[in-house]
Image (cartoon, grey):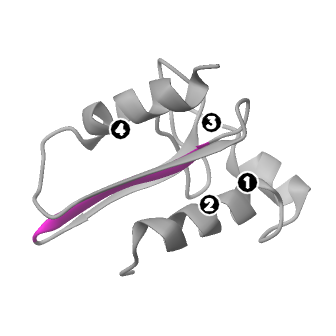
């Protein structure tokens, strides 16, 4: 999938709000076992609970997810492959969680 940050943020907000799948399906998808759910990851573990996914292809990497306890969505896109996209996302997750 190719996208931009605003479009990914809208999609993740809608998914986590139960607008794309039923709340029962979303609950199943977000029941994590060893950090993995059904098509989703606990991407911010251990510093926040976040439902999301990461992706990578030649020349780019992505991290996107929602923070259900905070009502926030974080999207990080890079035009170069980095070893730990979660480390790039962490300051944004921390900022989204701040009052």
Sequence-earlier tag: 2 or 4: 2
Q: Gap in Å between the C-alphas at discs 3 and 4?
A: 20 Å
Residue 52: % across, % down: 53, 49
Seen in the image, is 88 located left or right of residue 94? left
Question: Residue 91, located in which quarter of the rendered image?
Answer: top left
Sequence-earlier tag: 2 or 3: 2
Q: Gap in Å between the C-alphas at discs 1 and 2?
A: 6 Å
- Give the crowd class for mark 2: few <14, some 14-19, many >=20 residues within 10 Å: many
The answer to whether residue 34 is seen in the rendering is no
Q: Are marks 1 and 2 in contact (CB under 8 Å)?
A: yes
The answer to whether residue 64 is seen in the rendering is yes
Check if residue 65 falls in the magenta segment.
yes
* First to last magenta residue range: 59-66
Sequence-earlier tag: 3 or 4: 3
Name the secondary structure under disc 3: loop
Return the residue at label 4.
89
Which quarter of the rendered picture does the N terminus lie within?
bottom left
Q: Main secondary structure of the magenta part?
A: strand
Residue 32 numbered tag? 3
Return the residue at label 2.
12
Residue 16 numbered tag? 1
């Amino acid at each position: 999938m190719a996208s931009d940050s605003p479009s990914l943020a809208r999609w993740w907000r809608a998914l986590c709000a139960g607008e794309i799948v039923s709340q029962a399906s979303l609950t199943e998808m977000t029941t994590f076992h060893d950090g993995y759910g059904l098509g989703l990851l606990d991407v911010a573990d251990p510093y926040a609970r976040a439902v999301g996914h990461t992706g990578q292809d030649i020349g780019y990497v992505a991290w996107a997810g929602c923070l259900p306890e905070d009502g926030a969505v974080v999207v990080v896109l890079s035009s170069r492959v980095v070893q730990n996209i979660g480390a790039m996302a962490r300051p944004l997750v921390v900022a989204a969680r701040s009052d």
